[in-house]
Image (tube, rainbow, N blue to C red):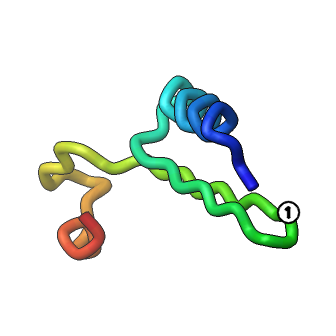
């Protein structure tokens, strides 16, 4: 199980690392799953844009 202090440190570390979102899951067998992600902002056409940008945003 993740303590409140550990969860706070993990969220703070994810934010400092530049991630926009973080999710921590603690399992009864002691495993801890960490998912972090960034979001794309301001994609406005251009050479690297695709039709999936609107779907995935």
Q: Position of residue 4 (x, y in %)?
A: 61, 39
Q: Which image quadrant for residue 30?
A: bottom right
**Image point (13%, 50%), residue name:** 44
Q: Which image quadrant for residue 41?
A: top left
The relative height of residue 19 versus residue 49 in the rendered view (above or below) is above
**Image point (60%, 55%), residue name:** 24
Name the residue nearer the viewer: 1 or 10.
1
Q: Position of residue 33 (x, y in %)?
A: 70, 61
**Image point (82%, 64%), residue name:** 31
Label 1: few (<14), some (14–19) or many (≥20) C-alpha neighbours in 10 Å: few
What element does badge 1 sit on? loop
What is the count of numbered marks?
Answer: 1
The relative height of residue 55 versus residue 14 in the rendered view (above or below) is below
Q: Which image quadrant for residue 45?
A: bottom left
Q: Is residue 28 left or right of residue 57?
A: right
Q: Position of residue 1 (x, y in %)?
A: 75, 55
Read off the residue under disc 1. Answer: 30
- The residue furthest right is 29
The relative height of residue 32 versus residue 43 in the rendered view (above or below) is below
- The residue furthest left is 44
């Amino acid at each position: 199980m993740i303590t409140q202090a550990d969860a706070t440190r993990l969220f703070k570390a994810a934010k400092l690392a530049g991630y926009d979102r973080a999710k921590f899951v603690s399992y009864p067998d002691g495993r801890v799953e960490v998912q972090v992600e960034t979001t794309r902002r301001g994609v406005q056409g251009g050479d690297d844009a695709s039709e999936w940008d609107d779907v995935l945003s």
